[in-house]
Image (cartoon, helix red, strand yellow):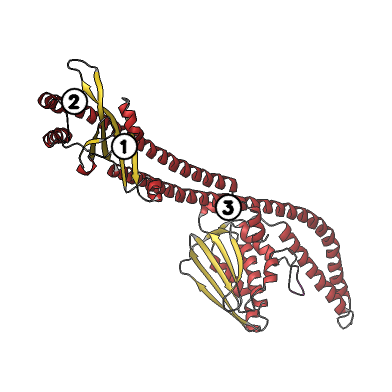
């Protein structure tokens, strides 16, 4: 099966991935929204506390002004006239001493005619009709406050205006001695507090919260990406494993059916084939050695043997043998192969170079089956170089495995052939069943090994065979 088809069938858990990232986005938006609402709540609390603070200051100021200014001045002068320098200075002394060390930017005291009779700022004294609705509410006995902001549109929108002040208006009342009840309204007191620094602290806190949230969400995002990636890898690996097992099962069923068919056909063919072969040999013995028909008998015997070899290949591929495992040294097996092929190697211009690692460990394997497998691989390497050449055989260990590499100097394997090289009955040779590599792979896999064929960077092909050294895998 092609890798592209496997990738199409091994779909990752996209629904879980999308749900995870969607949840993260929702959590991020919800957290930021909650942060903004919390900031608004903090600002509302700050506004309420500042208003309560101003009312307490006005109440205390009202008490001190009445006791230390209105009563003494009224007794001494008969009436209150802040245009009188002495009275103004006395009022200023009382107000400033009362509000000393308190967070107050401006104090204005209005008369009942909406005229500023006293102010921290002398240039405001005498201004008329600037109190507005808040002044009227206070004159009616109801305290109220308002926020005054200055700055650009974006500064005000983000909650960091250049200046933000709370202005509180409250009535200035006469006090009744020894009575909890207040007297009539004598005027209006306006107190201004600068909240710019407080709001900047709130804004910095909001920025800190959002940055913290962003960092936490960033860490969560990286963690989720890692988890999702790991999950995808696991799901894809399981999908590929499931596909591989399914293909192996289908292949096993196919081989089982093929094995039954081949076994039946082989049984029916081998009996008459044996009779034909023995009859031809018997006929040859009875014929005159000088008879021309003697060659026909030789042909019958040779072709019967070739047909028997083909049937044997069919049986070996369709019904792989179970290995009879015993301690076996791969280098020894390959040395026997080379010795067996020595005459072909010498007569056809081949050279075999071996690179065997020292102290190669033994593995549990069927030596006869491995002998057949490596013999086929060496013959294939020679057939890939009709004009002769060098074959390099390497045996080494690494990554807990025993590796065998067989490299030739042929033309390599074309892409079209590489796709079908493991298919049963596929061959590029004029004579052959196309089962040789299939039999080799069956033998290697029956030993829990792996085999692959690649083209070398220069020229020729490389066959890589891997056997596990761990006895638990055998």
Near-viewer residue (326 or 177): 177
Residue beneath label 3, please?
Answer: 237
Residue beneath label 1, please?
Answer: 129
Residue 241 location (% of width, % of height) = 61, 52
Say above or below: 125 vs 170: below
Disc 1 vs disc 3: which is toward the camera? 1
Residue 205 location (% of width, % of height) = 33, 44
Say above or below: 146 vs 448: above
Dot 2 falls on a residue whose secondary structure is helix
Residue 169 location (% of width, % of height) = 29, 32
Q: Earlier in the sequence, mark 3 or mark 2?
A: 2
Callout 3: few (<14), some (14-19), or many (20+) C-alpha neighbours within 10 Å? some
Q: Report the magenta residues as a range.
A: 427-433
| Residue at the spot 20% in from the left edge and 15% down from the top edge | 179
Residue 22 location (% of width, % of height) = 53, 45
Near-viewer residue (451 or 224): 224
Dot 3 falls on a residue whose secondary structure is helix
- For the residues labelled 2 and 1, the Cα–Cα distance comes to 26 Å
CB under 8 Å between callouts 2 and 1?
Answer: no
Residue beneath label 2, please?
Answer: 63
Q: How many marks?
A: 3
């Amino acid at each position: 099966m092609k890798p592209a088809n496997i990738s199409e069938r091994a779909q990752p858990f996209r629904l879980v991935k999308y749900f995870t990232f969607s949840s993260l986005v929702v959590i991020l938006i919800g957290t930021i929204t909650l942060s903004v609402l919390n900031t608004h709540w903090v600002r509302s609390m700050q506004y309420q506390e500042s208003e309560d603070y101003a009312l307490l200051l006005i109440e205390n100021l009202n008490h001190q002004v009445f006791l230390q200014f209105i009563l003494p001045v009224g007794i001494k002068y008969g009436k209150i006239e802040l245009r009188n320098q002495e009275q103004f200075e006395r009022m200023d002394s009382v107000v400033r001493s009362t509000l000393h060390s308190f967070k107050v930017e401006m104090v204005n005291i209005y008369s009942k005619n909406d005229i500023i009779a006293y102010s921290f700022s002398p240039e405001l004294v005498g201004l008329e009709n600037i109190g507005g609705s808040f002044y009227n509410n206070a004159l009616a006995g109801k305290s109220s406050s308002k926020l005054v902001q200055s700055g650009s549109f974006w500064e005000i929108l983000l909650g960091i205006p250049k200046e933000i002040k709370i202005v509180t208006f409250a009535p200035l009342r006469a006090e009744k001695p020894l009575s909890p009840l207040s007297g009539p309204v004598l005027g209006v007191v306006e107190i201004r507090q600068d909240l710019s620094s407080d709001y900047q602290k709130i804004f910095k806190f909001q920025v800190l919260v959002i940055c913290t949230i962003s960092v936490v969400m960033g860490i969560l995002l990286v963690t989720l990406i890692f988890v999702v990636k790991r999950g995808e890898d696991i799901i894809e690996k399981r999908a590929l494993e499931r596909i591989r097992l399914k293909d192996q099962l289908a292949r096993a069923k196919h081989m089982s059916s093929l094995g039954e068919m081949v076994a039946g056909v082989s049984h029916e063919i081998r009996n008459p084939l044996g009779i034909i072969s023995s009859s031809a040999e018997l006929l040859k013995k009875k014929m005159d050695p000088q008879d021309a028909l003697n060659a026909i008998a030789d042909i019958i015997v040779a072709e019967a043997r070739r047909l028997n070899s083909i049937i044997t290949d069919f049986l070996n591929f369709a019904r792989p043998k179970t290995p009879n495992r015993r301690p076996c040294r791969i280098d020894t097996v390959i040395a026997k192969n080379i010795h067996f092929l020595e005459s072909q190697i010498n007569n056809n211009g081949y050279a075999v170079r071996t690179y065997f690692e020292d102290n190669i460990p033994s593995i549990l394997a069927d030596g006869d089956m491995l002998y057949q497998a490596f013999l086929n691989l060496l013959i294939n390497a020679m057939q890939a170089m009709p004009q002769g050449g060098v074959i390099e055989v390497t045996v080494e260990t690494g990554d807990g495995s025993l590796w065998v590499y067989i490299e030739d100097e042929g033309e390599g394997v074309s892409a079209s052939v590489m796709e079908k090289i493991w298919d049963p009955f596929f061959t590029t040779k004029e004579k052959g069943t196309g089962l040789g590599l299939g039999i080799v792979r069956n033998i290697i896999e029956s030993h829990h090994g792996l085999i692959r064929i690649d083209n070398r960077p220069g020229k020729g092909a490389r066959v890589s065979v891997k056997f596990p050294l761990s006895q638990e895998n055998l």
